[in-house]
Amino acid sequence: SAVISQKPSRDICQRGTSLTIQCQVDSQVTMMFWYRQQPGQSLTLIATANQGSEATYESGFVIDKFPISRPNLTFSTLTVSNMSPEDSSIYLCSVYLQGGIQYFGAGTRLSVL
Amino acid sequence: SQELEQSPQSLIVQEGKNLTINCTSSKTLYGLYWYKQKYGEGLIFLMMLQKGGEEKSHEKITAKLDEKKQQSSLHITASQPSHAGIYLCGADISGANSKLTFGKGITLSVRP
């Protein structure tokens, strides 16, 4: 399996600030996915990031709140903007690799005060 | 409503006991994935099932997908404390090798 690195692994942020999460993959991939896992809940897809095009957002998620960059085939960032305590979650990036298996990064655990 | 239902919600077993957890969908699944998550961490891939009736095993864990491709079970033989965690099933319900829809997860505790 590929190595998927996420940074930061955790952070505590103040209300109203923004945090950018990085996801680095050690192989080139077409699509990268960003998920959110709220406390006690399952994973919910935020958006799909394709290199060279705008990210595709799921219902309930908007670009102004969760801007995504995808500058190349191995890297993506997700920004959580103007944070509130409701944004406290684990954020995970994932990619499809050989065999059609979706692998996940270790996640970013965000707490907003 | 939740598209993937997992049961039971949580489970506590004595070390050495066998257990089975389930994942059920009202829709045909094009791919069914089982992941394990330690508290607050990322997802560890366990197994992927795509064909009706398919069964895969790895060490003491066996996963099955029914013929209708709407239900999957995960069986752990002779459970150990290292098996403790949250087990999530995720499914490709669009058939486009795209996003996965997840169940809420099953919390497994194994008592020594």
Image (tube, grey):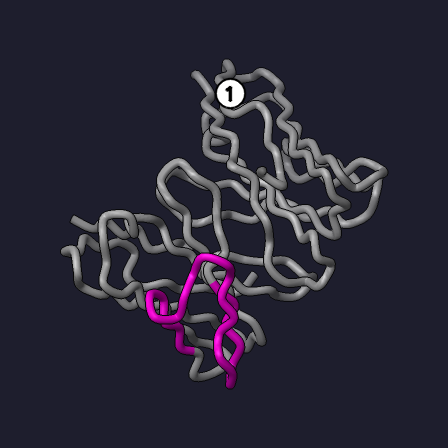
Residue drawn where x is 48% and y is 47% of the image? A43
Q: Quadrant of the N terminus of chain A?
A: bottom right
Count the marks: 1
Q: Any magenta on residue A97?
A: no
Residue B111 lies, with reference to residue A47, above or below; the image says above
Q: Helix or strand or loop: what does disc 1 sit on?
A: strand
Residue A84 position within the rendered picture, expressed as x and y whole percent measured from the top left: 23, 53
* Residue at the image point whose x is 65% and y is 48% from the top: B91
Q: Is residue B77 left or right of residue A70?
A: right
Q: Position of residue A16 (x, y in %)?
A: 17, 61
- A58 in magenta: yes
Magenta stretch: dominant SS?
Answer: loop
Q: Nearer the viewer, residue A80 or A2?
A: A80
Q: Is residue B39 left or right of residue A19?
A: right
Q: Chain of mark 1?
A: B
Which sits in the foreground, A90 or A74?
A90
Residue B71: quadrant of the picture: top right
Whether residue A81 is situated above or below residue B1 in the rendered picture: below
Does residue B103 lie above or below A49 as drawn? above
- Give residue B45's position: percent from left, percent from top: 56, 49
**Residue that carries the numbered disc 1 in the rendered image:** B11
Q: Residue at x 50, y 14 (%)?
A: B14
Q: Amino acid at mark 1?
A: Leu
The one nearer the camera, B106 or B46, is B106
State whether residue B111 is above or below residue A107: above
Q: Position of residue B75 (x, y in %)?
A: 66, 28
Q: Which residues are magenta?
A: A47-69
Q: Residues within 10 Å of mark 1 (few under 14, many from 20)?
A: some
